């Protein structure tokens, strides 16, 4: 069946008081709201069902087709019907509500400490990356530490406010000051916990981006290793040497990478030597390339003196085979060493952030139960009575459907093309049509 005026879909259902007509509104805001305010029945009140998002009308003796939605007196369903669809409903006594508020007050202060931990982890990771910024390309490798720093600061502020709210929830009179702020606070805290989860996942997903940044940064650092007299690059030799000694690595992917770059400056080459000039001329780019590595690639634990010159020339060394003998050079590349170092740090930080996320999610769940339980106490009017608390007032499907309909109808809020009264002439126009036109005297 359809409403005679606003064309809402109307169905008939049974309730404890008898059959009722249920009007399913097509969108919000709906035009029958304005019609209700102009209803001939002054006692008509618009009471929205908080669980089913519908409007209930009692039956009338006259046929439904002869009435519009405004012709029925609207009633609200009982409170038991509103709460029957609640998700994870829990009943709280006055003592349990007070204990829940006190526990949440303590947990919110613990959350402030966890926010400081997040801030410290973000600063630590940022300093570790900043110490070797010359060995990384200008990529977004700072996104994770910046994210942790921002989330840590937000955690301190939002949990400090949450502690104050939970402390006041012990007293019903003080809760009234926070009643309107509770739901926006819970929504903001939910998005904050979502940011925590994103930050934890970023710690595990940053490996590929970090590897590419290290590859480009180390390649450029090895290329400028010889530029000890160039401003802005003179420190790279020391940086690369200290890196290879500290992390026991050599080159980008291995010691062979040094064979393809000129790591000795021209000022230290004897240009009068035929060997040097021939080597420079043999290279298309005019680089002095040789099969040797810097001293920092040598492994001090090797019993044999370090062979860093003519590494692949077997006759140049006594009892030496490049193909078979284990070299006394670091075999691991510096990119792999740094990647393992930063990956271990970020995985540890990611695990810590995940634990904090689970803790914050449990605190948010408790605050939601406290909010709904306190609001139901206010509806009942007895501060010492039992009250129900829940996570969602309706089922997951009903809540998702309702929010989806609101979003879908946002663009229809101000549409009046389907208004049945749009083409009805106004009363003022009818009155003006009955007035005869005034005759203007014409001079003869």
Image (tube, rainbow, N blue to C red):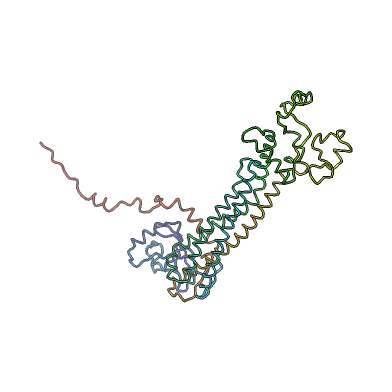
Could you say where residue 264 lies in the image, as x and y percent from the top left?
A: 72, 32
Can you say whether 275 is above or below 435 in the image?
A: above
- The image quadrant of residue 177 is bottom left
Quarter of the image with the N terminus is bottom left
Could you say where residue 257 lies in the image, as x and y percent from the top left?
A: 75, 37
Identify the residue at the far right of this view. 319
Viewer-nearest residue: 293 or 74: 293
Q: How many marks?
A: 0
Residue 358 shown left or right of residue 170 in the figure: right
Residue 100 shown left or right of residue 274 in the figure: left
Viewer-nearest residue: 359 or 179: 359
Could you say where residue 394 lies in the image, as x and y percent from the top left?
A: 52, 64
Identify the residue at the far left of this view. 444
Viewer-nearest residue: 148 or 236: 236
Quarter of the image with the C terminus is top left
- The image quadrant of residue 192 is bottom right
Could you say where residue 213 lies in the image, as x and y percent from the top left?
A: 65, 42
């Amino acid at each position: 069946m359809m409403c005679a005026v606003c064309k809402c879909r109307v169905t008939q259902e049974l309730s404890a008081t008898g059959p009722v007509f249920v009007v399913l509104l097509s969108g919000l805001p709906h035009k029958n709201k304005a019609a209700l305010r102009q209803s001939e029945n002054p006692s008509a009140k618009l009471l929205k069902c908080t669980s089913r998002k519908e409007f209930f009308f009692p039956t009338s003796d006259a046929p439904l087709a002869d009435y519009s939605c405004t012709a029925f007196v609207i009633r609200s369903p009982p409170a038991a019907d509103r709460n029957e669809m609640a998700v994870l409903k829990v009943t709280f006594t006055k003592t349990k509500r007070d204990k829940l508020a006190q526990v949440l007050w303590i947990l919110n202060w613990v959350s402030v400490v966890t926010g400081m931990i997040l801030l410290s982890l973000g600063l630590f990771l940022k300093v570790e990356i900043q110490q070797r910024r010359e060995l990384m390309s200008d990529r977004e490798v700072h996104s994770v530490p910046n994210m942790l720093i921002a989330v840590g600061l937000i955690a301190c502020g939002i949990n400090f406010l949450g502690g104050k709210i939970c402390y006041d929830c012990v007293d019903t009179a003080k809760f009234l000051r926070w009643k309107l702020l509770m739901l926006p606070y819970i929504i903001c805290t939910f998005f904050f916990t979502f940011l925590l989860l994103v930050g934890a996942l970023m710690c595990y997903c940053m490996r590929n981006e970090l590897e590419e940044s290290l590859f480009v940064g180390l390649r450029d650092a090895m290329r400028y290793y010889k530029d000890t007299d160039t401003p802005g690059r003179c420190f790279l030799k020391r940086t690369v040497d200290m890196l290879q000694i500290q992390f026991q690595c050599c080159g980008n992917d291995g010691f062979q990478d040094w064979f393809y770059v000129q790591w000795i400056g021209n000022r230290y080459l004897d240009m009068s030597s035929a060997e040097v000039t021939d080597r420079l001329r043999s290279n298309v780019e005019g680089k002095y390339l040789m099969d040797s590595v810097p001293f920092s690639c040598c492994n001090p634990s090797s019993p044999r003196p370090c062979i860093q010159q003519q590494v692949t020339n077997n006759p140049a060394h006594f009892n030496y085979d490049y193909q078979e003998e284990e070299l006394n050079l670091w075999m691991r590349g510096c990119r792999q060493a740094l990647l393992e170092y930063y990956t271990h740090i970020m995985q540890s930080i990611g695990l810590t952030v995940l634990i904090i996320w689970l803790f914050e999610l449990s605190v948010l769940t408790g605050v939601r139960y406290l909010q709904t339980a306190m609001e139901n106490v206010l509806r009942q009017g007895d501060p010492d009575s039992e009250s129900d608390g829940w996570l969602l007032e309706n089922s997951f499907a009903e809540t998702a459907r309702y929010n989806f309909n609101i979003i879908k109808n946002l663009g229809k809020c101000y549409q009046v093309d389907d208004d049945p009264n749009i083409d009805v002439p106004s009363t003022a126009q009818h009155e003006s049509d009955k007035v005869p036109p005034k005759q203007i005297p014409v001079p003869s």
